[in-house]
Image (tube, helix red, strand yellow):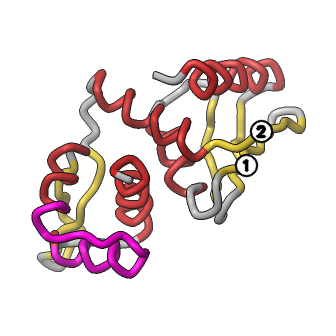
Amino acid sequence: MKVSRHAKIIELISQYDIETQEELAEYLNNAGFKVTQATVSRDIRDLKLTKVSVGGGKQKYVMHRQEEAGMNEKYMRVLKDGYVSMDMAQNILVIKTVSGMAMAVAAAVDALKWNEVVGCIAGDDTIMCAIRTTEDTAAVMEKIRKIVSKGI
């Protein structure tokens, strides 16, 4: 449950300008996760979220940009937990996910900062990844296969 909640938090903060723990708790509760402010506080600490200014005196939660080994493990866990299948169309990689997990998995793929991946677009259960070349697409598919088959 914690992993899927963390995936939802990543999705929510990439979708909305969430300024407070209470606001994040409300979004999570509306999404079916029964959480308290204390749980959200722990999740923010676990995910190493930080706040940035968005203008007008407002702030929002974002993923901390400093690269840390532990964070890559969290991104790989989100990828593994949400992954269903994938297929390629030349330099486009299409990843199917568990319903509702595509945005979190796409955010995880982007956060892994693989050089081959130009960017991802996510719907509810489908992600389209623009990959630099057809050869790079095969390489990314192999990376994903290793993560989802062996785990982390």
Does residue 137 appear to the left or right of 73 in the view shown? Answer: right
Q: Position of residue 87 (x, y in %)?
A: 83, 37
Per the image, the residue denoted by label 1 is 96
> Residue 102's image quarter?
bottom right
The magenta span reads 22-39
- Are discs 2 and 1 less than 8 Å apart at CB? yes
The prevailing secondary structure element of the residues shown in magenta is helix
Residue shown at 73%/21% (left/top)?
A: 136
150 and 11: which is toward the camera: 150
Q: Crowding at label 2, few (<14), some or many (≥20) Cα neighbours within 10 Å? A: some
Does residue 73 appear to the left or right of 18 in the view shown? Answer: right
Residue shown at 63%/23% (left/top)?
A: 149
In the picture, which quadrant includes the C terminus?
top left
Magenta stretch encompasses residue 23? yes
Rendered view: 64 above or below 27 = above
Residue shown at 30%/72% (left/top)?
A: 34
Q: CA distance from mark 2 to mark 1?
A: 6 Å
Per the image, the residue denoted by label 2 is 86
Q: Amino acid at mark 1?
A: Lys
Q: Position of residue 94 (x, y in %)?
A: 77, 44
Does residue 70 appear to the left or right of 21 in the view shown? Answer: right
Magenta stretch encompasses residue 17? no
33 and 127: which is toward the camera: 33
45 and 29: which is toward the camera: 29
Rendered view: 121 above or below 143 = below
Residue shown at 88%/33% (left/top)?
A: 90
